[in-house]
């Protein structure tokens, strides 16, 4: 079956520009997560959606970062006034029930979007 | 969530068993050990998880010490496609908890 997909796979932008990154989760998964991975580091949690609502946005680094999931499926991560330090791979994951769904609730990750801010 | 310590890198010959250690000395009684791996240019992939008993699935085996302060992920017959970064993560399974990734272990499987 189809896994988590992310578009675009690569995005190059200039400092100060606005970017949107898209995530299509596995069909039927209620939970969706965004992570950011800098070079040589493990993924870092940004935000988690349960359905349409952001259940935990404690990982968003500042108010330039925002994410939506209006219909409880596709999600968009939005970054305003991009900075060179925002350059990273942005990963999306989905799971059937969410973090409170018990030990077997597995997160499935997409291939990521590599964002480069010049 | 408890923190984990893993060696930064390991080597393994193709066809041999790869044994990846993880230290989690501050693990709590309600925390599970999860293993994910990340092949180059891909997202992380779930491998296995356990609480206190040893676990085995089609990908790997997980051995957790009796005091639960450390564990070992075993790939019984490593192949070149097992070359990846392996992450050991500790998290509570009941109630809300996200995945906290460390730097993991870079496993290089060579011919």
Image (cartoon, rainbow, N blue to C red):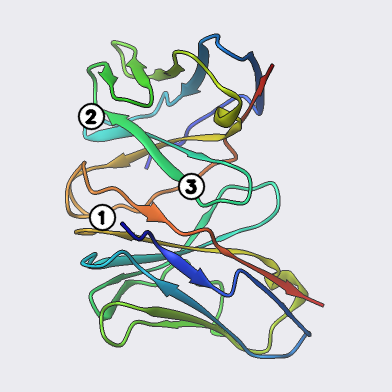
Look at the numbered disc 2 and give the secondary structure of its residue.
loop
- Residue A69 as seen in the image, left or right of residue B96: right
Q: Quadrant of the C terminus of chain B?
A: top right
Can you say whether A33 is above or below B1 in the image? below
Q: Which mark is residue B44?
A: 3
Q: Do badges 2 and 3 share one subunit?
A: yes
Tell me the mark number nearer the camera, choosing from 3 and 1.
3
- Location of residue B96 with respect to B4 vertically, above or below: below
Q: Which residue is mark 1?
A: A99
The residue where tag 2 is placed is: B29
2 or 1: mark nearer the eye = 1
Q: Quadrant of the N terminus of chain B?
A: top left
Give me the C-alpha separation between circle 3 and circle 1: 17 Å
Chain assignment, label 2: B
Q: Nearer the viewer, residue A60 or A76?
A: A76
Left or right, residue A91 beside residue B10 = left
């Amino acid at each position: 079956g189809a896994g988590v997909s992310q578009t675009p796979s690569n995005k190059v932008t200039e400092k100060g520009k606005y970017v949107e990154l898209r995530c299509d989760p596995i069909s039927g998964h209620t939970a969706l997560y965004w992570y950011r991975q800098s070079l040589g580091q493990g993924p870092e949690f940004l935000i988690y959606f349960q359905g349409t609502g952001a259940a935990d946005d404690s990982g968003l680094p500042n108010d330039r970062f925002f994410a939506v999931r209006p219909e409880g499926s596709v999600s968009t991560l939005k970054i305003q006034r991009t900075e060179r330090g925002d350059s990273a791979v942005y990963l999306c994951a989905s799971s059937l029930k969410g973090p409170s769904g018990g030990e077997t609730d597995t997160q499935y990750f997409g291939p990521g979007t590599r964002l480069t801010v010049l | 969530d408890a923190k984990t310590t893993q060696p930064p890198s390991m080597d393994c010959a193709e066809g041999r068993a790869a044994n990846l250690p993880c230290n989690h000395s501050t693990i709590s009684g309600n925390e599970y050990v999860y293993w994910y791996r990340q092949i180059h240019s891909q997202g992380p992939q779930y491998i296995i998880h356990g609480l206190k008993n040893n676990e085995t699935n089609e990908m790997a085996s997980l051995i957790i010490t009796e005091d639960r302060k450390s564990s070992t992920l075993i790939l019984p017959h490593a192949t070149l496609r097992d070359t990846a970064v392996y992450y050991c993560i500790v998290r509570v399974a009941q109630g809300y908890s996200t995945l906290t990734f460390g730097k993991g272990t870079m496993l290089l499987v060579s011919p």
